[in-house]
Each structure stands twice: as C-alpha cells, then as structure tokens.
Amino acid sequence: MSSLEITLKVILLFFVLVTIHEWGHFYFAKRAGILVREFAIGFGPKLFSFKKGETRFTLRFLPIGGFVRMAGEDPEMIDIQKGQTIAVKLNKSNEVTFLYLDQLNQRSDVIQGEVTNIDMERKLEVELLVGEHEAKYTIHPQAMMVTKGTETQIAPFNRQFGSKTVGQRAMSIVMGPVMNFLLAVVLFCIVVIMAGVPMNTKLDTVVADQPAQQAGLLKGDIVKSVNGTDIGANFNRLTDMIQKSPQKSMNWIVDRGGKEVPLQVTPSSEGKVGIVIGFDKRSATFGEVLTGTWDYVSKTTVGILDGFKKLVFGQVKMDDLGGPVRIVEVTGQFVQNGMTSYIYWAAIFSLYLGLFNLLPFPALDGSRLVFLGIEAVRGKPVDPSRESLVHFVGFALLMLLMVVVTYNDIVRLIKS
C-alpha cells in the first residue's frame, strides 16, 4: 500500500469522525432555532471556507478537532454603542438590513447618523440622530453588521444559545458525542459482517524449523482438540494452552482433508510452536451481527473507561500518552492491515472521541453539560463570563497537554 493511500485514509478518518461529531451539534442547534455562525473542522488559521445560509463552513490548519460556534454561546465580538456614528441601509419595507460601522463615506444608498439608542436583541430597533432630526428604524432579524470588509449577522435573543430551554441546549451539546457513539455502532456492525463468524481454528502459516513443523503440522490443518479439549473457533483457548505448556508434550488432533490426524506437539521453552492462526468463516446471521456488535461496543467502552480511570489516578505515565503524531502512526498501521482493520480502528476511535468529550473537563462537552445541570438545579444560569473563563482555561490546558504529548511522539519517533 502506497504512502499516499495511507495518508489519504488517515485524513479521511479524521475528517469523518470530527465532521459527524460537529454535525450532531449543528443539526440540533439549528432545530432549536439557534443561529450557528460557523461550522469548523480543525483549529487555527482558515485554509478554506464558504458560506451556506446563515453558517460559514471552514477548514482550519490544525487537525486536532473542530467546533460549532453558536450565537450567544460566547460574548459577541462586535457591538454598537450609543454615540457611535454608523450608516444603515433599508429594504423596501423600511427595515434595516445592513449596519455599516466603518468607511461610511464610501457607502451608497445609506442613511448616516449618530446612534442615540439601539437594541439588536429584543426590540430590534435603532434610533439615529440624522442631522438635527431623530429617526427610528426597525432592524430586520437577519440584518448584517459590516466592518473591515466582514459581514456578521445580528443575533436576536430568540436566536441565541442562552434563550433556549435547558433541554434544548443540552440536546445541542450532547448530540455531538452521541453521533460518535452511533457511528461506532454502525462501524462495529460492518466489521462483524465483513469478518464473518469463525467456524474452526485453522493454521494459516506453519513456520519452518519450529515445533509445529517438526511435529508434522501443515498449513491448512484444522485444529479439532488439544489434550482432549475441543478448540472449535476459540483460538484464545489454543494460544493459552500453548503458552502454559512450555516443553510439555501436547496431544493434538487436526482435521486434514476430512481425516483426523493425531500429533504430538511440544512447545518451546518460551511457550511457542511457530504457527499463525486463521479461521474457516461463514456469514453472520442477523442475531450474530447484533450480539457481535454489542460485544465490540461494550468491551471497547469498558477498556476506554478503564484507561481514563488509570489516567485520573496517575497509573499512566506522561510518556505513555500519545498525541496527533501517534494517532496518525497507529492509524497507518491499521490501514496497512486491510479494510476490516481500518474500519475497526475507526469504530474504536469514534467511540473514544464520544466518551472523551463527555468527560466533565472544562472546554469539553461534558463540562458544558455540567453547567447546564447546575442551571437546572439552581433555576438560573451561571454567570456567562465566569463559565467562559472556565472553558478558556480548560482549552488552554488541553492545548498545553497536546503540545507535550506531541513532543513525546516526536521524540519516540526519533528514538525508534
């Protein structure tokens, strides 16, 4: 497999997992009537962007996540103050559709004046002192503020994140991780279908000059039993028995061309015989697809949560953590092992992203849900400026951790 193909599949994995996560936020925010200003894949400088409807879709430089920027979730960056001189453009219904904040003398078909009163959230009105006369205008709910060549749509209060019920806001946040869970389930289901159901433990390879070959085992032999214990499709049982029998003779019965052949196999002192195990397979039934998918999801979830627990209690060293470089390296290894392996890794990674984002750490979705829970109990929201500060500090710490683990990845690569 070429390096270009591996690279493209790594990029595709990142793009799909982040996009499905952010789409969960985006879709349910739009359903709640929230103005979504930006749907971004990546962080940092913009590489590419286009606007569709009210939302700008952007691809950014750093491939370490993404975000959906909702109106009112963070303090608005542009505001108009009393005493400020602006220019407005009206539509045929005498509603303000554009509010110009600079280059006023270069604007055509506008009314220029000093702001005496303005409300762009609830009343949607602006009062201007035009010459010696005051004029009041209604602001269109989708009016644009224009400054430094950039258009920013106003956000009436009923389009802001904070105007929605706790349930609507919680749904727009939690559906990001939920989409990762759903994707993981679908991918695990595909893995079960592609992999099929093992019927027998078969020898795919018999290594030369190793105990297996010396005992007479051949490629294609189906292992029926060892020491009187049926093996069937349970290759873990076979490998466990071999590892526990170093330099001990074992009674194997193999099926070779429909005939049962008894053999004496003695593992080496390391508990190895020199075989590569494969399977005879059949297509999975509908019930087996469901149970197989559940097994993958449940066991993988337990493993990920156990990893989080070890991290919290200091049972994992910093050098053991991996960042973007390590993720790319591991993904490349799964890609080289074939499509089933690639999809399996995508499912694990998607499940991991969903669980990670639900952790109650500042800047993650889990932390935002905690603040909404506090609001539900108190009956009033936490001060938005304080919540924003908490998330900012959390994001800074996550970026610092990302730098550290990326450094570890680079050092590990150099040493290897």
Image (spheres, grey):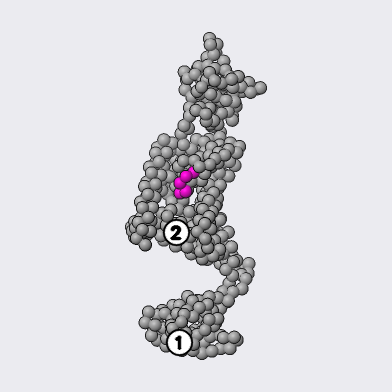
Looking at the image, which is closer to me, 154 or 330?
Answer: 330
State which tag comes first along the sequence, 1 or 2: 1
**Which residue is at a point 55% across and 50% down the rendered structure image?**
20
Where does the image place residue 316, in percent across and percent down from the top left? 35, 59
Where does the image place residue 382, in percent across and percent down from the top left? 43, 38
Task: Tell me the CA gap for discs 1 and 2.
Answer: 38 Å
- Magenta residues? 60-64
Verify whether residue 62 appears in magenta. yes
Task: Please name the amino acid that badge 2 sits on.
Answer: Glu
Looking at the image, which is closer to me, 301 or 333?
Answer: 333
Regarding mark 2 in the picture, which secondary structure is present there? helix
Q: Which residue is mark 1?
A: 214
Asked if one can make out residue 301 in the rendered structure from this viewpoint, the answer is: no
**Which residue is at a point 50% across and 59% down the rendered structure image?**
3
Verify whether residue 410 appears in magenta. no
Asked if one can make out residue 73 in the rendered structure from this viewpoint, the answer is: yes
